[in-house]
Structure formats: C-alpha cells, structure tokens
Amino acid sequence: MRRALLVLAIGFLMISGMSGSENVYAQAKKKPIKLGMVADKTGANAAYGYSHEKVVRAAVAKINKEGGIMGRPLELYVEDTESKAPVGALKFRKLAETYGVDFVIDSNNSGVAIACSPVAKELKVPYFPSASATELSGEKGNRYVFPACTSVREEAKGVAKWAVRNLGKKWVTVVVNFAWGWSSEQDFKNYIAENGGTVEESIRVPIGTSDWLRYLSGKIPKDADAVYFACFGSDFLSFIRDLHAVRPDIKKLGAVYCFSAQDIKAVGTPVEGAYCLTSYPTTLEGLNTKANKTYRELIGVDPEGKEIGTGTRFVLAYNWAMWQSVFALKAAMEKVGWKGREDTPNVIKALEGTQFKEGVEFPQGDMRFRPQDHLALAGLYVERVVNGELKVVAKIPVADAVYPPMADHTKEPF
C-alpha cells in the first residue's frame, strides 16, 4: 500500500513538474514586440533625446510590469540621430531592417522627422515623431506617420486669440532663423491678423547668436504692444537679456519650447512678467491631477520640474507626447488583436480618430489623432513668470487651436 502511494506521489510530482515546465516554455515562446526609437542623443537636440529616452523607457517598464501587450513584452531598441536629418533616416532604416522593429518613436528634430517620414511609408512601419513641424500633418506626412505632439500651426492659432485679447493688437515677431522659427513667424502673423491684430515687424536672428542687440536696437516700433518670440536654450537667454535692455516695458510671449528647462529664477528681472505657450505645464501645480502626479513620479520628475536624482531641470516639452504615444499604440494594438505586421493596417485604422481619455497613460489630458492628417488634438497652456516662479494663467481649449486638415491620409492605400 505504501509502495503504491509512493508511486502515485512521484507520478503526481512528475506531471506537476512537466506542467510547470510547459508553462515556463509557453512564457518563453511569447515573442517580444519590438519598439524602435530614433532619439536625438547627441547634437543640438541632445537634451530632448535624453529626456525622451528616459520617458519611453519608463513607459515600456510600466507596460512590461503589468503584463506587456496582450501578454507579450515590449523590447526597446534605441539609435542616436545625432540631431541630423540624414543620420536619422539611416537609423530608422537600421531599426526596421536590421533589428526588425514593428514601430518607431521619437525625434524632436523636425528635419529628422521629415526625413524619416518617407522611410516609414516605404517600410510600412508606423512612426510617432515628437517634432512639431506643421508639414508632418500635411505634405510631409503620410498614413504611417502620427506626429505625437501639437504642431506649430496648432500652437500659433491656439494662442493668437488669447494674445490679442490679453496682451495687445500690435506685435513684433522675433525668431531664430531656421524652419521652426519661420513657421512660428508666419503662422503667428496669419492668426494674429485673423483675430484683429497686426504684426508690425518680423525679425530673424541666426541660431547661436550671442549678441541680439544689433538685431533688436531700432527695429521694434515704439507703438508695439508685445513681442512673440521663438527661441530656446542659450538663444533664449541672449534674447531675453537684450530685449530687456532695448524695451523693458514691452509685453513678451514665447512659443512652445522657449522656457524649456530654463532656471527662470536665475534669469531674473529680464524674464519677470513674461508669458510662454506650452503644451505641458512645467510645475505640478500647473496641472495638479492625480494622473499627472503619478506620471511625473514614474518618469522621475519632481513637482518643480527637476529630474529626481540629479536636481537638473528636465526638458519637459513633448515628453508627454512620447509617453502618450506608447500607450495609444498599446490601446490600438489590443483593440485589433495585433499579432504581426499583417495586422499593422488595422492598428493605423484604430489610431485614426480614437479618443483617448485623460489618465496616467494620458496625463496631459484628453487627446486623439485626427483621421485625415493625424494631427494630435490636445489642449495648450499659457505660463507666466510671477516673482520668479512659473504659473499657469490660462488654458487654451482644443477648439481654439484646431485648423482645417491639409491632407487626407485615410485615402492612401496601405
């Protein structure tokens, strides 16, 4: 009897062991979903590449910790664009052809994103750039490209009505002399006129200029109410210092990016009272929701916008767009039951027009990709420097920022 019981017990253990082994084997067989990232890790946009990579890695970690996408883990492959368009396009191709990634995310550099766009279409790999060039939702975009953030045109249109009502009707634009600056200049001028204002003077300054006085002195009309400026980093610091020397009384409104990662308190008097458009508030106080608090903790940013662990100012511009892209992609894949490249067209269809609701996965607020041109429809904010601190003073609704589609990608075949 004892012998029989012992045999039964051994048999049970063997069966249990086989079952356990099969489960482990089944888990191991779950093929990872490969996500590529063209990050601007070096070059002019290196600060953005650093922060965007950190944010995407945090999103991937969250998804994998919670069971992956339909039980399959996400694997992230990162390549450096060097902030150069030709390099970015080559790295996109490397990710798709060498590593076999299923989707590609990032590049804050508009030149890189525009160069990658036709490659995405050629290789049939959906691409989610964080660049704001308006053309990415127009003639430079296609059905495989989903610009994850608000565009320059969306931002200029959104703030124009508020600017005329609150800051004045007579404007001067001052921008850095490259594509982003040109678009900011032209779109702001058009929408200011649409809202009853005028741009009296337009000034372009070469990027990397340390002395802005020679571009500003005598160029700003005495009756101008305000300046709309588009510059960032060291250009912003030089501009704000020299504008204060020329016209300390004039009202100032910056385009998205301008205050990004700046130690406003250290800038001091020249920036006091200035306004800046943003797609995401710098401080937690500016968007004090449970979802945003959790998101900031997950990406390692404190309530003041500093990176936890280093204490340096984090580049928050469009980090939310990278985070939300990963979760929009996850939602679309789960909606259609994506198994491989043959299901990618269905993922694209799911992304076109799906409404994503505010939450930890979408901390910036409700958003969707417009079907025709894949424009990311999301709200905007206006920050102001008050006693050396950034305060949100207005929220721009989506309705004020939206403009007619410049393309209809839904008519494009896969």
Image: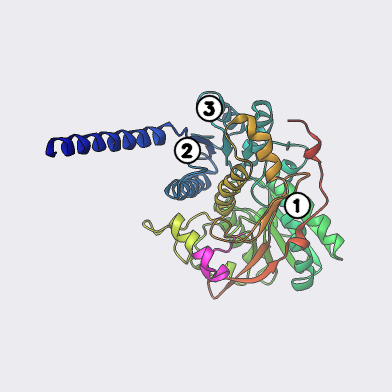
Q: Position of residue 133 (x, y in %)?
A: 70, 45
Q: Position of residue 163 (x, y in %)?
A: 75, 67
Is 286 inside the magenta-drawn segment?
Answer: yes
Comparing marks 3 and 1, which lies closer to the viewer? 3
**Quadrant assignment, res 10:** top left
Say left or right for 294 vs 248.
left
Q: Farthest residue in the front direction?
A: 1
Say left or right for 284 vs 162.
left
Q: Farthest residue in the left direction?
A: 2
Mark 3 neighbour density, 10 Å: few (under 14) some (14–19) many (20 or more): some
The residues bearing labels 3 and 1 have C-alpha atoms spaced at a distance of 34 Å
Disc 2 marks which amino acid?
Leu
Looking at the rendered structure, the secondary structure element under dot 3 is loop
Quadrant into which the N terminus falls: top left
Q: Residue at x 44, y 60 (%)?
A: 297
Q: Which residue is mark 3?
A: 100
Please give the label number shown on residue 76: 2
Is 133 inside the magenta-drawn segment?
Answer: no
Q: In the displayed structure, would residue 211 be above or below residue 93?
A: below
Please give the label number shown on residue 153: 1
